[in-house]
Image (tube, coloured by chain):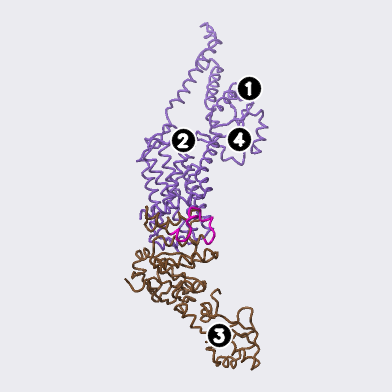
Chain colours: A brown, B purple
């Protein structure tokens, strides 16, 4: 039994001059929910596509259950389940027919197939509507059947690629609960990609933050958030005065201060990003300093510490950019 | 692998079943076309030509020609009273031609000058006038021969007796009633010559025999349905290519292809599972149209059922092979909607599936339509057997295999 259910080493995927995935390495332990957090186009889906054998990496390697994803691809596909970002379902077939079809492609048949189909449909809470055509489902119900189709072969490692895009709150909650139950009750390992930090914080044991094809941080959500200390304060000032920055950074409750580019629509304003070791204390010290030195504050944002703030701190942009 | 192919096949049939408009096109439209085209061209195999007929001759020959033309099955006649009216109507494009038997034709053919049967032709369709001309010549030939004989006999009896070494006195001394002899001989010679001419027509010294191209002679002349039924069945079966291209394109953009290829399945079983259902549907379509045609159009399926079944199977496989190749090559919705239809129309026109061709096959031989339609014709109208259609079977299977192989080579699932 390998120590890790997935080991990715220096994965690279290039399309001509474009590098979609750039030297990405990470591991997933057996029974772990691992999140890849990043904005659209960061390289999350390309990483999953390589790991699930849709196309080989340009360079680098990966092993799933100790099996090489290029050399042992057929065996790898038997132990993984893939829930793609797209609703990869046939709308004129029923939910049950869709799940059954994918089960048949795994080689399941007879009573085993029927039992497995019933089981996974029940798991995602779609038993009552299973015989209706997919085209009559809400977006959330389609997502749940999409998830069921990825579970029909009882995979050891499940790839969930943005499973909650376009989903109503009720179905989103149902998907969360399904993921948690799969992990808790069956010990299923899951690679979960998302650009919603709330999902990553709630579901993932560890999170890799990915941007422009590169993995820029990897740890538990708690440690990633703690790395921010007491949060972020963003001050809008009239000018990027280096003396002001240095003075703010020297305050006891401030760890780091730097000028960043202003957001669209706030041109003409200098944004001083202040990383605090203690949020409230830092805020008081900064306000006191500005008041005492007659520094005009044009705007003030206090960002609570979370993965969104971590991403902002690492990349200077929002996850939804 | 077989289980995967079967799963894909069943799924594809279920998905395809929702495209009801396509089924109408593939199953019902061929029958409608066959019925319409059959009615247009008539069921005898030769097209029926509608023409006007004007008989201004009051003599026996005019009546005989009218009668003969009426017996000609490929002519649909409408009688008009005057040449002027016929000329006006043909000029207006109401008929492609008018046959005019002029006044005094019966008398004129007995003179050295002879007579003229006129065919007035629509200038816009002058190239087709040969059909009418040939039919008029065929219909009038026996009457014109009679007239020719009668004119010759009359010429002889109008010749002076001295020409034959007699004088009027010689004939009078023998007590011959010249008038009576003239009548008797005229009738006898007329009868003999007519008989000889008719014999010459029936049993000429130089005969032109029409023989079938092989020993497998048809029991009867092919009807227009012998061409239309296989032609339009095959033509419309290839419209399935459009449906194939559409479903694969939707799977590509909808992410189903990505999901399927994250499963343990390879390209060959996947493409077989995509092509096979449409091959089966094409076979079912040909069987349905043939079966309906036997009931509706008295279409004769021939006497080689095994050859017929194999040809239907090979045709279906060719539809599947070519269809999957086209589906693999199209990369946009626009292409998926237009390329298969365009290809279907062009191949049908080139192959002669739409209209029986009198030209050398040439380019037609690269189309599966040609081999399929010619094969069905051989089995049905020409009463051929399995050996006669082996080249057709080989060509169709080769096309199916070649196109499928290229499709496997060119297929990209992402």
Residue behind mark 3: A279
Q: Secondary structure at mark 2?
A: helix
x then y, percent, for residue B56:
64, 26
Q: Is residue A294 above or below residue B91?
A: below
Question: Does residue B175 appear left or right of residue A72 in this picture?
Answer: right
Q: Secondary structure at mark 1?
A: loop
> Which stretch did the figure color magenta?
A120-140
Label ID, residue A261 = none
Q: Residues within 10 Å of mark 1 (few under 14, many from 20)?
A: some
Label ID, residue B294 = 2
Asked if the magenta segment contains residue B251, the reply would be no
x then y, percent, for residue B258:
45, 63
Q: Earlier in the sequence, mark 1 or mark 4?
A: 1
Identify the image quadrant of residue A109: bottom left
Residue behind mark 1: B58
Residue behind mark 4: B97
The residues tagged by marks 1 and 4 sit, at their Cα atoms, a distance apart of 22 Å
Tell me the chain of label 2. Answer: B
């Amino acid at each position: 039994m390998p120590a890790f259910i997935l080991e990715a080493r220096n994965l690279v995927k290039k399309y001509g001059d474009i590098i979609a995935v750039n030297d990405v390495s990470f591991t997933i332990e057996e029974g772990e929910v691992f999140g890849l957090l990043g904005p659209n186009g960061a390289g999350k889906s390309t990483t999953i596509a390589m790991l699930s054998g849709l196309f080989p990496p340009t360079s680098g390697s990966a092993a799933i259950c100790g099996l090489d994803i290029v050399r042992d691809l057929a065996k790898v596909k038997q132990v993984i389940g893939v829930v793609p970002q797209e609703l990869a379902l046939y709308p004129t077939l029923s939910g049950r027919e869709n799940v059954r079809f994918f089960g048949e492609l795994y080689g399941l048949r007879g009573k085993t197939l029927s039992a497995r189909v019933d089981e996974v449909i029940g798991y995602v809470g779609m038993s009552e509507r299973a015989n209706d055509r997919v085209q009559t489902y809400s977006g959330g119900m389609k997502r749940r059947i999409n998830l069921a189709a990825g579970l029909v072969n009882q995979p050891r490692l499940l790839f969930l690629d943005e499973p909650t895009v376009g989903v109503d709150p009720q179905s989103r909650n149902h998907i969360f609960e399904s993921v948690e139950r799969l992990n808790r009750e069956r010990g299923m390992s899951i690679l979960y990609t998302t650009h919603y930090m709330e999902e990553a914080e709630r579901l993932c044991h560890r999170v890799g933050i990915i941007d422009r094809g590169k993995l820029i941080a990897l740890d538990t959500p708690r440690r990633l958030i703690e790395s921010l200390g007491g949060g972020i304060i963003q001050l809008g000032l009239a000018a990027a005065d280096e003396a002001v920055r240095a003075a703010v950074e020297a305050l006891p409750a401030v760890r780091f201060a730097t000028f960043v580019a202003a957001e669209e629509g706030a041109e003409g304003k200098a944004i001083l990003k202040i990383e605090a070791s203690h949020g409230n204390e830092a805020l008081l010290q900064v306000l006191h300093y500005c008041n005492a030195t007659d520094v005009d504050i044009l705007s003030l944002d206090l960002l609570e510490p979370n993965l969104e703030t971590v991403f902002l701190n690492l990349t200077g942009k929002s996850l939804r950019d | 692998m077989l289980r995967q192919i079967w799963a894909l096949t069943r799924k594809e049939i279920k998905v395809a079943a929702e495209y009801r408009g396509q089924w109408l096109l593939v199953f019902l439209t061929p029958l409608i076309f066959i019925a319409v085209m059959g009615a247009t061209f008539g069921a005898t195999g030769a097209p029926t030509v509608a023409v006007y007929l004007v008989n201004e001759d009051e003599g026996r020959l005019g009546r005989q020609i009218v009668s003969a033309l009426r017996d000609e099955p490929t002519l649909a006649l409408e009688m008009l009273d005057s040449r002027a009216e016929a000329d006006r109507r043909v000029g207006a494009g109401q008929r492609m031609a008018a046959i005019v038997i002029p006044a005094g034709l019966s008398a004129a053919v007995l003179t050295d000058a002879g007579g003229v049967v006129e065919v007035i032709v629509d200038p816009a369709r002058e190239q087709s006038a040969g059909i009418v001309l040939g039919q008029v010549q065929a219909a009038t030939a026996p009457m014109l021969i009679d007239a020719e004989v009668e004119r010759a006999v009359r010429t002889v009896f109008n010749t002076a007796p001295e020409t034959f070494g007699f004088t009027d006195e010689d004939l009078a001394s023998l007590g011959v009633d010249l008038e009576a002899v003239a009548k008797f001989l005229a009738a006898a010679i007329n009868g003999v010559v007519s008989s000889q001419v008719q014999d010459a027509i029936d049993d000429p010294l130089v005969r032109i025999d029409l023989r079938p191209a092989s020993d497998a002679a048809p029991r009867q002349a092919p009807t227009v349905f012998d061409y239309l039924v296989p032609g339009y069945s095959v033509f419309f079966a290839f419209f399935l290519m459009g449906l194939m291209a559409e479903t694969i394109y939707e799977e590509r953009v909808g992410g189903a292809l990505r999901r399927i290829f994250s499963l343990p399945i390879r390209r060959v079983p996947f493409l077989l599972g995509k092509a096979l259902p449409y091959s089966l549907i094409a076979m079912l379509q040909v069987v349905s149209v043939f079966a309906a045609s036997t009931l509706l159009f008295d279409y004769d399926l021939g006497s080689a059922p095994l050859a017929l079944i194999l040809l239907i199977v090979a045709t279906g496989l060719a539809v599947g092979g070519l269809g999957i190749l086209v589906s693999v090559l199209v990369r946009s919705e626009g292409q998926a909607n237009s390329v298969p239809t365009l290809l279907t129309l062009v191949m049908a026109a080139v192959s002669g599936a739409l209209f029986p061709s009198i030209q050398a096959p040439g380019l037609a031989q690269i189309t599966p339509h040609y081999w399929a339609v010619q094969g069905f014709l051989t089995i049905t109208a020409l009463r051929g057997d399995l050996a006669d259609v082996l080249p057709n079977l080989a060509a169709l299977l080769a096309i199916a295999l070649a196109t499928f192989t290229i499709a496997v080579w060119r297929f990209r699932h992402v």
